[in-house]
Image: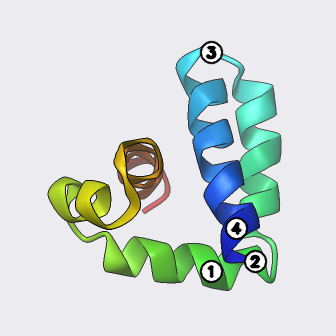
Amino acid sequence: MFQLCRDLLPLWHAKLLRGDTTGADETAMALLEEPFGDVLRTLCLRARTPAVAELTYGPELGTALVEWRHTHT
C-alpha cells in the first residue's frame, strides 16, 4: 500500500497545482479510504516539517505531503 500511496499523493498534488480540483478531490477521496488512510496518516506523522518530509521521502513526495498536511488538517 505504501507504493500506491506514494504514487497517488504526487498525482493529487499535480492535479491541485494545475487547477483540476475535481480530479484532485477524486484522488484525495481514494487516499482517504482504507487501507490508504492508515498509510497516509503514517506518512504525515513522519513528515512533521517540510525539511523532514523532503529528506525522508524526496522532493516530489515530500512537497506533496507538506501540501496535503496544509490542506487536510
Residue ID for mark 3: 19
Residue 16, picture quadrant: top right
Image position of 17 (left or right of 33): left
Mark 2–mark 1 CB contact (< 8 Å): yes
Kindly identify the residue that appears in the image at 41 percent across and 45 percent down.
67
Sequence-wise, which precedes: disc 2 or disc 1?
A: 2
Q: Residues within 10 Å of mark 3 (few under 14, many from 20)?
A: few
Question: Which tag is nearer the camera, tag 3 or tag 4?
Answer: 4
Identify the residue position indicated by label 4 in the image: 3
Of label 1 and label 4, which has the lower sequence position?
Answer: 4
The amino acid at mark 4 is Gln
State the SS at label 3.
Answer: loop
Say left or right for 23 vs 48: right
| Mark 2: few/some/many CA within 10 Å (<14, 14-19, 20+) | few
Q: How many marks?
A: 4
Cα distance between the residues tagged 3 and 1: 26 Å
Looking at the rendered structure, which numbered label has been put on residue 72? none
CB contact under 8 Å: marks 2 and 4 = yes
Q: Residues within 10 Å of mark 4 (few under 14, many from 20)?
A: few
Labels 2 & 3 near each other (Cβ < 8 A): no
The residue labelled by disc 1 is: 39
**Camera-nearest label, 2 or 3:** 2
Instruction: Compare marks 3 and 4 and give the one earlier in the sequence.
Output: 4
**Residue 51 locus on image (x, y percent):** 16, 56
Image quarter for residue 73?
bottom left
- 39 lies left or right of 62: right
